[in-house]
Image: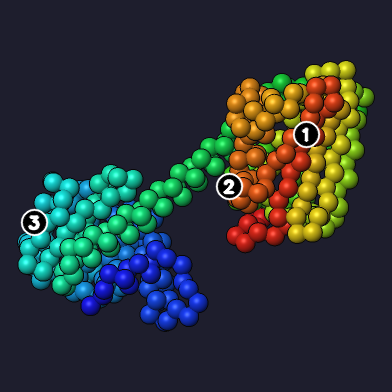
Amino acid sequence: MLAVPRLWWLRRPVRTGAGPEAVGALTAGRRIATELRGGLDGPGAVVAARELRRLLDVASVGLGGLEGEVVWGGRPSDPRAAAAVVEGVLRTDSRHRRADLVAVPVHARDELTGVLVVQGGLSTAQVREAAAWVGEALERARLEASAGVAEAAELRALRAEISPHFVYNSLTVIASFVRSDPERARELMLDFAAYTRHSLARSGDYTTVAGEFAAIEAYLALARAVLGERLRVQVRIAPEILPVALPYLALQPLVENAVRHGVELGPGGLVQVTGEAQGGECVISVEDDGPGMDPAYAAAVLAGRGNPGSLGLVNVDRRLRRVFGPGYGLVVETADGAGTKVVLRVPRFQPGVAAS
């Protein structure tokens, strides 16, 4: 029969010299947590109940959601008694016991999310410890799901930021070349297609630096057609960083921001894009010689307190930090009248991050 300390192995890191029993408990714990991502009434609940039964070494384990439907790992000897204790827990949010059946509430974020039923001689304290671990697994799953929803929403917001003004001007310029320079019109139409295809891409979470720059080149071709000699561009990218994986729209908004705020709103200017490898990191900077901004305001922008036009920088920074960790993301170097430089720093290799 399982003792309480064995459950604690699910919540503590493996120490040097940990035996096969502890490692097996960790492996089972990971499998259970994975299966519980869909909730106590999700498709993985049956597998989770079976794995939990093996881990606890009991006759049967039941997991149920708030609707009272219970999936079992091993059949309870008295189904009616099992149904009664489950109903009691969900009605009172407290422990119920009949003979060797123990049912306790499962909480996530201090909210009742379901019930855990154990038959097989464990004490109430041991069953509560197991229920607490199940609740923590459910809470982690909720947080992961929330992070995924937030990231998808931020990416949708970036896509929605495609300037109707820029699109209109691009199409107007293309139309102006249809008769006077059909070949130029064709090239710009292909650039427009590449730009919009990348900006609205729906497949995959990641692209590469090379993929981002293909879209950036298309955007700059259109911007130069619209702005003419007002826009000057210098791009220097080291070949070794081209395969580095990035989230979609990690670089393109930075270049668009430089053109929009550093060049388009004034008499014109220079946009410089450079990228290089620095040890195990990829560092890319986008710089304009426009009006710049107060450094305190730049800090507010990255904190999400800027005007709606700064949404792109905020979203890029948040997504980079979420994917690569708090040590990465964007740094803004600027001052009034001194232009703006945005530096992106990410690892060249990150486990689990690869272009599709």
Colour mode of the rendering = rainbow
Residue 84 badge: 3
Left-right relation of 216 to 351: right
* Tag 1 secondary structure: strand
Disc nearest the viewer among 1 and 3 = 1
Q: Which sits earlier in the primary sequence, circle 1 or circle 3?
A: 3
**Placement of 202 over or under 60, stated as above or below:** above
Q: Nearer the viewer, residue 8 or 200?
A: 8
Q: Amino acid at mark 3?
A: Ala
Left-right relation of 50 to 75: right
Q: Amino acid at mark 2?
A: Arg
Q: Nearer the viewer, residue 263 or 127?
A: 127
Relative image position of residue 341 (x, y in whole percent): 80, 34
Q: Look at the image and tell me whether residue 58 can be seen.
A: yes
Relative image position of residue 323 (x, y in whole percent): 60, 50
Q: Amino acid at mark 1?
A: Glu
Relative image position of residue 270 (x, y in whole percent): 89, 30
